[in-house]
Amino acid sequence: MYVKDIVHHLERLAPPMLQESYDNAGLITGKMDWPCSGVLVTLDTLPQTIDEAVQRGCNLIVSHHPIVFKGLKKLSGSGYVEETIIRAIKHDVAIYAIHTNLDNVHHGVNARIAEKLGLQDTKILSPKTGQLLKLTVFVPVENREALLQALFDAGAGVIGNYSECSFSLEGQGTFKAGTDANPYLGNRHERFTAQEHRVEAMFPVWNKKQVLEAMHANHPYEEVAYYLHELLNVHQEVGSGMIGTLPEPEDAAGFLQRLKKVFGTPVVRHTPIVKPEVRKIAICGGAGQFLLGNAIASGADAYVTSDIKYHEFFDAVGQLLLADVGHYESEQFTIDLLAEQLSIKFPNFAVLKTGVSTNPVCYTT
């Protein structure tokens, strides 16, 4: 087992290109070709988590939050960031961060929060655009089915809950093979008219390499006629936040008490109760003020997130119940999510969950 084996699986789970522009997800220390002795999964990487990894025989830490967000100009041990990097390098510990890219997939951080709250019929609160491409390729009629299947196997043709989606139109294509050509149909130096299908299928941008490789490998022509379109359609499975419904309406005051229990916090900061009952719930793990407008526009009865500032609460007053459960508290289930995904993929490999709480916020009740 190598570090790259773990990383490649994580990047299929949450493609790196889905991270936000300010983020620094990916391999922060270490090398892809290092043999991996074990994985320690944590929310944050701190000096004490490096020590824990070494003590428990793990030379790869998979962390939700990147320890390095900005460029480091020196490594003198000034502050916890520099100290963490120094210890990681000293002990040959690789650090991999899977941050906003995991926030932005339907099966990521917010899906686990929705599961904990018992939400049903969940969907992305703010879907992203610019994440889809459409392939148009021309293929002889008799080769259409084999090519389509190869494209589907490579990840093309998925739209929401539907797979193997495509469009085909039969027509005629012409070409003249040159002296050095080896034509599948027709003869050199003669124009040939072929019965072809125009085949179209959509796929996410991060599958571009696999889809094009499948197209070339399964197309009979040595020169494939195709083109790609960037689509403005929203990708229903990619974006920020999530919204869903409770099985039954719940008393708003009781819902706030349940939040304390679910997230293990003694305090939930919230706006005044607007409706006596809530059912449609919007959520965002981590700092979610940027989605407050989306939550209001969606008709949510409540929005559960963290890191709301004093004046930002005013924007929700009279609109919905805005509940701040704390940053660490909202994302703590990410550790279980990542550990489960890695254990399923690598059942005979050491995947450990941190025993160190990295929450820097304390409450006195």
Image (spheres, rainbow, N blue to C red):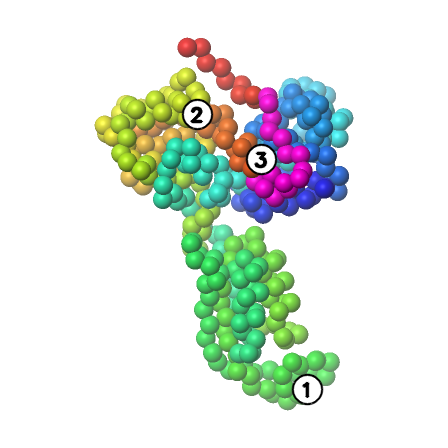
Q: Does 361 appear in magenta?
A: no
Tell me the SS state at disc 2.
helix
Q: Answer with left or right where residue 330 lies relative to residue 69.
A: left
Q: Which mark is residue 188?
A: 1
Q: Which mark is residue 283?
A: none
Q: How many callouts does the rendering have?
A: 3
The residue under the point 63% across, 62% down is 213
Give the crowd class for mark 1: few <14, some 14-19, many >=20 residues within 10 Å.
Answer: some
Residue sitting farthest toward the left:
276
Q: Nearer the viewer, mark 2 or mark 1?
A: 2
Q: Which residue is mark 3?
A: 339
The residue under the point 41% across, 26% down is 262
Q: Position of residue 173 (x, y in %)?
A: 54, 81
Give the crowd class for mark 3: few <14, some 14-19, many >=20 residues within 10 Å.
Answer: some
Q: Position of residue 134 (x, y in %)?
A: 50, 62
- Could you say which quadrant of the image residue 365 lies in? top left
Q: Nearer the viewer, mark 2 or mark 3?
A: 3
> Can residue 293 be seen here?
no
Of residues 126 and 335, which is closer to you in this image? 335
Q: Which residues are magenta?
A: 341-356
Q: CA distance from mark 1 to mark 3?
A: 58 Å
Q: Position of residue 295 (x, y in %)?
A: 34, 37
Residue sitting farthest toward the top:
365
The residue under the point 53% across, 72% down is 145
Amino acid type, residue under disc 3 in the picture: Ala
Q: CA distance from mark 2 to mark 3?
A: 19 Å
Q: Does 40 appear above or below 175?
A: above
Amino acid type, residue under disc 1 in the picture: Arg
Q: Which residue is mark 2?
A: 263
Give the crowd class for mark 2: few <14, some 14-19, many >=20 residues within 10 Å.
Answer: many
